Image (cartoon, rainbow, N blue to C red):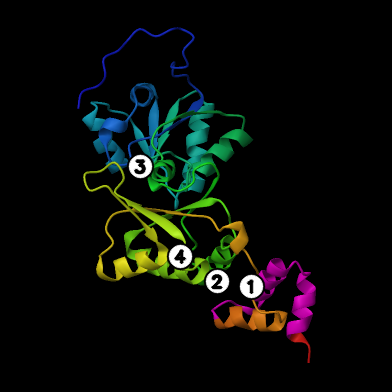
């Protein structure tokens, strides 16, 4: 794929790459043709590129005949590398931050370096482009006027259950990310907390050759993936609860409610917090109830 031909642009167009700036550059989520002309211009003109995986980014840049110094920046080195990157930007260099696919800082350690830049007075600007969450939402056929982005659910069973319990009464369309090897367990959890009739669109391999959107219900999705092997990265778009359907989904007795959550795998303290929040009761009242003789 060749680099786009240069064109004359107005001096007032926000295209000049400046020193002392962090550029958040959105990259394709599967189809290289989705990269923007502005993204390529910035990538070709910055002093260096901070990348989630320098190998993957290096391959992408080579396709556009761009060669730039790179530094890795990912979840496990973000604290140390973030300081190094911002020090270089403060010294006058320009940096393009990219993730492996999509928009940096969305379910991504990029949010940490953006916060650090704001704390230190370093200018940040964003080069818009692909975002898997928004793309999946537009493909889902579900309401798009109001939605909530949840990203990846916690790997902690108690935190996961607590979050899904809170979301059971969410009326907005919900968007989740999920890896293929976790999809079946996640669908089981969604079934347990949201019920089987809730609509869901399972979007996989978006913009790629094997792109697929499966619009169904949560119960049907569970059955489908008992037989079908999950492949590729998934974006799950789920309809919100109907207001008429929202009702307390817990026992009348607070103590029974706590014991129910403990039986489901929560620690006693997490269960006390969850029950207090769900019922609008002070936490110490529930704690005293649980620990009375």
Q: CA distance from mark 4 to mark 3?
A: 32 Å
Which quarter of the rendered picture does the C terminus lie within? bottom right
Residue 270 numbered tag: 1
Q: Are marks 2 and 1 in contact (CB under 8 Å)?
A: yes
Q: CA distance from mark 3 to mark 2?
A: 30 Å
Asked whether, in this view, residue 267 is left or right of residue 24, the answer is: right
Secondary element type, mark 1: helix
User: Is 266 in the magenta?
Assistant: yes
Q: Which residue is mark 2?
A: 158
The answer, for residue 194, to whether it is visible in the render is yes
Q: Which residue is mark 3?
A: 101
- Secondary structure mostly seen in the magenta stretch: helix
Q: Residues within 10 Å of mark 3 (few under 14, many from 20)?
A: some
- Which quarter of the figure has residue 163? bottom right
Q: Which residues are magenta?
A: 264-290
Asked whether, in this view, residue 144 is left or right of residue 276, the answer is: left
Asked whether, in this view, residue 137 is left or right of residue 112, the answer is: left
Q: Which residue is mark 4?
A: 197
The disc, 1 or 3, on the residue closer to the chain's N-terminal end is: 3
Secondary element type, mark 2: helix
The disc, 3 or 2, on the residue closer to the chain's N-terminal end is: 3
């Amino acid at each position: 794929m060749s680099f786009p031909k240069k064109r004359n642009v107005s001096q007032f167009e926000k295209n000049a790459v400046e020193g002392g700036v962090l550029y958040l550059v959105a990259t394709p989520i599967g189809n290289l043709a989705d990269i923007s002309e502005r993204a390529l211009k910035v990538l070709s003109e910055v002093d260096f590129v901070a990348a989630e995986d320098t190998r993957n980014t290096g391959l992408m840049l080579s396709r556009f005949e761009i060669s730039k110094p790179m530094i890795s920046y990912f979840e496990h080195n973000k604290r140390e590398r973030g300081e190094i990157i911002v020090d270089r930007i403060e010294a006058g260099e320009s940096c393009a931050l990219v993730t492996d696919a999509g928009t940096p800082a969305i379910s991504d350690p990029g949010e940490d370096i953006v916060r650090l830049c704001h704390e230190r007075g370093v200018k940040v600007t964003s080069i818009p482009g692909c975002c898997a969450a928004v793309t999946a939402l537009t493909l889902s056929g579900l309401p798009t006027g109001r939605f909530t982005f949840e990203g990846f659910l916690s790997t902690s069973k108690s935190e996961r259950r607590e979050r899904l319990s809170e979301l059971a009464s969410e009326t907005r369309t919900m968007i989740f990310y999920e890896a293929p090897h976790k999809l079946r367990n996640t669908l089981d959890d969604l079934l347990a907390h949201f019920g089987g009739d809730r609509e869901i669109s399972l979007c996989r391999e978006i913009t790629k050759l094997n792109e697929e959107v499966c619009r169904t219900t949560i119960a049907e999705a569970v059955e489908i993936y008992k037989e079908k092997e999950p492949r590729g990265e998934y974006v799950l778009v789920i309809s919100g609860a109907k207001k008429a359907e929202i009702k307390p989904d817990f026992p009348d007795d607070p103590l029974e409610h706590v014991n129910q959550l403990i039986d489901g795998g929560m620690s006693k303290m997490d269960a006390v917090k969850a029950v207090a929040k769900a019922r609008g009761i002070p936490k110490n009242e529930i704690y005293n109830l649980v620990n009375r003789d």
